[in-house]
Amino acid sequence: MATWARLGATLRSTAKSFWPVRSIFYRRAFGAGLLGSVVAGGFIYYKNEPRWRLWPHIVYAEDEKQEQIMVPQMSMRRRRFNQFASMIYEDEPYMTPRDFLHSVLMEKVDHKLKKKVLTKADLDEMIKVASKAEAGNNLFRGIGDKGLISYTEYLFLLTIITKSDTGFHIAFKMLDIDGSETVDKMEFQKLKKVNGPKKELLRQGGTELSDNADEVDTTLQVFFFGKDGNKKLQYKDFCRFMEDLQAEVQEVEFTQFSKGMKTMRREDFAEWLLHFTNEEDNEAYQDNMRKRIPTGQSITFDEFKEFCLFTYHLEDFAISVKMSIEGSKPIGLAQFKRAVMIATGHELSDNVLDTVFKLFDMDGDDCLSHKEFLAVMKDRVHRGLRVQPQYGVSGYWKCVKRETLEGAQEALRKNGSPI
């Protein structure tokens, strides 16, 4: 207070000494300068004297940034896995083979019961079932709810049912250090994580979810490597498993959309094409289906399988189209058929092609925009879980290739490879 008293006395003395000055201009100039000096002095004193502060100087941006780093958003795939997983073991959610099939068929989970908490006895029973399971395209349906699938295995299986086996063949070969065409249990763990997430914090309702579910003997591990984990997985058996799983998913989807019949109506095939998609033009596609696709015509299971094979090669198809037409011009039926043959080595039936063109041909000129068609098909193939646009148009493939290379290189280093 003494400081402020001395400052006030000085200002009053100075003001009296200038009182005789009669010029309005100088009085105004002096008044403005005096006011500025008082304000500036008070501000400096305020900044250097914390006890006089009314509002402390707080920065929230850095804390918020740290919080965002500590708690990342749960991925779409993790959320979907948690929604369909019906089992819990040691606080970790698991899918059953039936849950997995439901997750690739349905957009929303159909059961409302609480997740079943498994005991060690339940797990031992599931291991026994898996050890007796036989290979074939009825594996998952045969096991039903008597098995466990972890989150990393879920990602692994999603990739199998949406891709050709080329990328997996490369990864398998790189993990097969001695060239024996076999993979052991430890190598399989690394193979799964090639397509799994890197170390990430997984949270659900504020609770951390551990990512060590692979420590539990799951159905796939027992099926591939036996109860004791000592069996070797040969590449030919692995390829058969991939082909069987794709065939099983195809059969289940065909049965669902054909309503259990031996053939699928063309309008049902169109519904299957648009399932899991969320495009702005979906209403227009639906209108095309109602107006252009004739009733009473059907598609066989073999025709359906050939189209599924085509969807596993969408990137190859896109390259073929890009090389055969200029820019973003619409593609005609003959060019479409040729591009499919180049990409897959197989032809699509005229029945399927006619359905596709009538569905996606927006202006009725017997051509379609291949970019729009590919966008819809990629959403369909990935069951609505396609990587978001912020990663770029080809971001998903870049991510898969990068993760595959990094995962395989890490496996090579851990196995003593000189590379």
Image (spheres, rainbow, N blue to C red):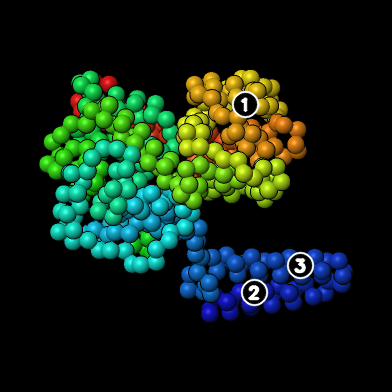
- Residue 36 in view: yes
For label 2, the crowd category at 10 Å Cα-Cα, with few meaning under 14, some 14 to 19 and many 20 or more, is few
What is the count of numbered marks?
Answer: 3
The residue at the point 51 percent across, 65 percent down is 57
The residue at the point 55 percent across, 68 percent down is 45
The disc label shown at residue 336, or none: 1
Q: Residue 159, how many percent across, how many down?
A: 40, 38
Secondary structure of residue under mark 1: helix
Location of mark 2 (residue): 10
The residue at the point 35 percent across, 53 percent down is 99
Amino acid under label 3? Ala
Task: Tell which of 170 and 29 is nearer to you.
Answer: 170
> Does the residue at mark 1 contact the one at mark 2 (Cβ under 8 Å)?
no
Mark-to-mark CA distance, 1 and 2? 92 Å
Sequence order check, earlier mark of 2 and 3: 2
Left or right relative to 213: residue 204: right
Mark-to-mark CA distance, 3 and 1? 80 Å
Identify the image quadrant of residue 418: top left
The residue at the point 66 percent across, 48 percent down is 286
Identify the image quadrant of residue 209: bottom left
The disc label shown at residue 32, or none: 3
